[in-house]
Image (cartoon, rainbow, N blue to C red):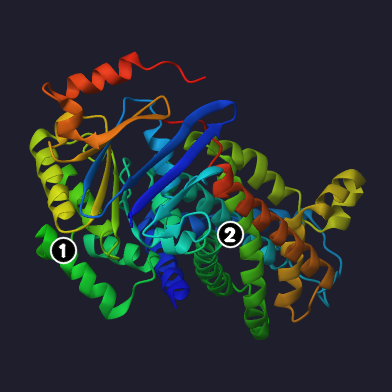
Amino acid sequence: MAYLVALRAIVLREALRFVSQRSRLLAAWVRPLVWLVVFAAGFRAALGLSIIPPYQTYITYEVYIVPGLCGMIQLFNGMQSSLSLVYDQEMGSMRLLLTSPLPRWWLLFCKLLAGVAVSLLQVYVFLAIAAGFGIALPPSGYVFAFPVLILTGLMLGALGLLISSTIKQLENFAGVMNFVIFPMFFMSSALYPLWKMAESSPLLRDICAVNPFTHAVELLRFAMYGQLNITALIWVALAFVCFMAGSLFGYDPARGMRRKGPRA
Amino acid sequence: MSTLTLSHVSYRYGAKLALDDVSFSLEKGRFCAFLGPNGAGKSTLFSLLTRLLVTREGSISVAGHDLARAPRAALAKIGVVFQQQTLDLDMTVMQNLRYFAALQGLSGKAAQRNIDAALDRLQMRERSGEKARSLNGGHRRRMEIARALIHAPEVLMLDEATVGLDTASRQAITSHVHDLADSGLLVFWATHLVDEIRAGDDVVVLNKGRVLAHDTAASLAGDGALIDAFIRMTTTQQEPA
């Protein structure tokens, strides 16, 4: 019972913070919409797509990038959550959380689930707006995507958690944008299929193929069309386990809350 | 039985020894000032007591629960006020208190009863809907103290709780916390400000990671002032081997 009480409180707090930060709320929806409406319109003419699974017919580029943009929302949200964790560490509220009598792994998992809940809200609002632009999924796709979005959200959130356990100052967070978010997003199948990438660089294609974000996007893409991509599922699940294990190690009190020297 | 017992606690940051064989016991209903100059190891010990760091050498017991073996039971008996402010300024007073109660596993009527008691103690019931940001420094601190008591702990630990406050707020808070000790709580008050300590208070003096003295303030001061005794003790101590 105490576990669920804490989970509810942490999720509510995260949701409250998200809603009260209007610029974050706006950015979460405007960013993928710009990609969908502006970027995709330009790319549509330049990039020809053949019929590739899970699609059973030719699709427009806008349809192709929808799963990638959902992944992008979760990727940014995961990093935003880790940014707020670093902020919490600097401001001291993380100490309050970690001195709760509940187990630390549960508290961190609650933080993770809170981030996932916020990302689900963002993704479904984005999908509704996309449908308004005529880019809709099969009705069952919205349902099948739900459990996958939870898993991909957990994986990307755990990555954010891992990063937050290694960053000592808020100022260092800009590096995360350059060295984590952009490479993960651009070196994936979010914007172009891997066979298209192989045409220009087989090496780049291989790098994209081991990027967990690629598998998150593909898992989502297949689920949106009622199919299960087992390989992608295994990749995402494994990545989640690794990132979560790394996070728990990073926040292990036996190592100190964060690596640091004596303060006093 | 002692409410808080430290037995041969040492802690290192790499090669640097921050705490060196620290041992003492404290009883409930006492106000214990944990006195030491900057760099004495107070914050390290505070982190060990709140399990932000884990004890590698020695043991810590809170209300009969070993902090290493039974951390949940031990932490449930501790209320903490950190030196850094830990309120969420964008949440209301009530939301902050409810959030903390939930982190302690309290919900429903039990949580609300304790929160109402905390607000009454602060005389802030009518301000419960205000954002924490709107409170002044003294009120924020008092609210953090009240919040730390929501789950009815046996030990209240405060780390330099009056830093950054004006004189009136400092006096109000030290007086409030002394009252809490009189009501049966063990108050563990880390500070480097000697004027916050009363003659009957227990004092543990820490310097360079070692306990130099543990007695009442009156005994440590002798015929002179506590500040003089404190300076004498901390300036004549030899470097640890």
| Residue beneath disc 1 | B119
The image shows residue B44 at horizontal and vertical percentages of: 43, 37
Q: Is residue A4 left or right of residue A194?
A: left
At 61% from the left and 64% from the top, the residue drawn is A153
- Amino acid type at circle 2 is Ile
- Can I make out residue B77 in this image? yes
Question: Could you tell me which quadrant the C terminus of chain A lies in?
Answer: top left
Q: Nearer the viewer, mark 2 or mark 1?
A: 1
Question: For the point 53% across and 65% down, which residue is it?
Answer: A106
Q: Would you say the residues marked 2 and 1 are in contact, meaning their CB atoms lie under 8 Å apart? A: no
Q: Which chain letter goes with mark 2?
A: A
Q: Is residue B38 or residue B205 the one in the foreground?
A: B205
User: In the rendered structure, the residue with mark 1 lies on which chain?
Assistant: B
- Residue B28 sits above or below residue B231 on the image: below
Of the pair A240 and A94, the residue shown nearer to us: A94
Disc 2 crowd, CA 10 A, few/some/many (<14, 14-19, 20+): many
Q: Secondary structure at mark 2?
A: helix
Quadrant location of residue B75? Answer: bottom left
Q: CA distance from mark 2 to mark 1?
A: 40 Å
- Residue B115, x across and y down, in percent: 22, 68
Quarter occupied by the N terminus of chain A:
bottom left
Amino acid residing under circle 1: Leu
Kindly identify which residue carries mark 2: A73
The answer to whether residue B90 is seen in the rendering is: no
Q: Position of residue A23 (x, y in %)?
A: 40, 53
